[in-house]
Amino acid sequence: MKACTIAGYEDLGSLTIDPAYPRPAVTEPGTLLIKTCAVSLAPGDVRVLSGRTRLMQAPERFPYVPGGDSSGIVVEVHPEETWFRVGDRVACLFPEPRPFGALAEYRLVLSKNAARVPEAVSMEDAATVPSSGLTAYSFREHVRPGDRVVVVNACGGVGCFLLQLLKREFGASYVLAVTGNVELALSLGADAVVDRRSGASWWEHPSLQTAPADLVLDLYGTATHWNASCSSAAVKPAAQGGRFVCIGMEDPWPKITHFWDVIPLMFSFLKRGIYSSLHPRTCPAHVAHQGLKTKVQERNETVLQLMSEDKVKAIVAKELAFDATSVRDAFGMQISRQHSGKVVVKIASEA
């Protein structure tokens, strides 16, 4: 089978399409073999390539097959499989935390990480869901009816789904988006937008001066947004129900190559929680969100169903072909992080 391979860390130049890569087979219960139709890239794919998170995300060997999120057709199941059948259309999340194996004509996936794709949803759109749609939908547990919400980095892969869900599905009353793509954010459901390209600060937005936010959803990281939530009056303090939820770290591209690298990362989250608990009248409660940990199948199938009902749409920045030059371009886009939505590589048609 054809598979994309990369020979080493930070070696995008070695990316090639191997025409004779070994095709995997189902040997273990709980696994499926799928014919891959499309793959969407995510920040985790870039972190693996960089080698900066190799303590947790190192490939088993080099060259490795990159890519985590995909869609495809089930072509083989284990005899003990009871949920999926050959011919099912599925969208598949990688076995967290290691996003490998997707950029190939066939791949093995865990059945618990696969979600059925309705006929009304294209396989290219379905491939955008497994990480980004899942993470966006998992924020439901933090949103209360009537919340006024600030979304930082609102037009990335997660943000494009989240903006569509906050008011329609989660019950938020007001959404302020922080992004460089003003028109897209407004079209996806934001009530107002702070254009980060202008250098404006979201905590100075007029809408928050008289009615502060109940909830900040930080989809990027860095200390700037947390510090502003504590030092300004733009966010309610914990004593009044204010919350700050973050899926990133103070360094969005952390180095985790040794066990001791984990200590400062853990401390960056612990210190926020401790500080907010000691200052509930001035700081919102801090929560470190784990969006890929639970209810993978259920949440992804919910998002895919909403897509089939035209209540949510995939935002695809660019769809590329499955050749070495195009896949390098896809990684280049993901590394630069200048696009909105998802970058998708089409591997094959469904037929």
Image (spheres, grey):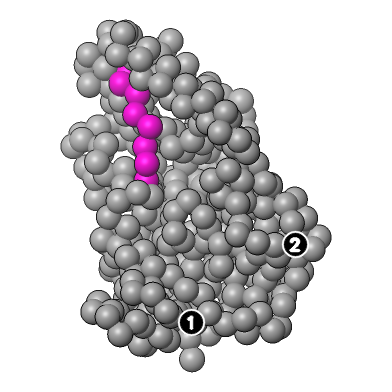
The N terminus is located in which quarter?
bottom right
In depth, the one of 94 and 333 nearer the eye is 94
Q: Is residue 78 above or below residue 53?
A: below
Residue 294 appears at what percent x and percent y? 30, 51
The Cα atoms of the two marked residues, 2 and 1, are separated by 23 Å
For the magenta stretch, what is the residue range? 284-291
Point 39% across, 75% down: residue: 28
Q: Residues within 10 Å of mark 1 (few under 14, many from 20)?
A: some
Q: Residues within 10 Å of mark 2 (few under 14, many from 20)?
A: some
Point 70% across, 65% down: residue: 63
Closer to the N terminus: mark 2 or mark 1?
2
Q: Is residue 335 above or below residue 284?
A: below
Q: Which mark is residue 274?
A: none
Cβ–Cβ under 8 Å for marks 2 and 1: no
Is residue 97 at least partly visible in the picture?
Answer: yes
Point 43% across, 37% down: residue: 247
Q: Which mark is residue 7?
A: 2
Q: Which residue is mark 1?
A: 25
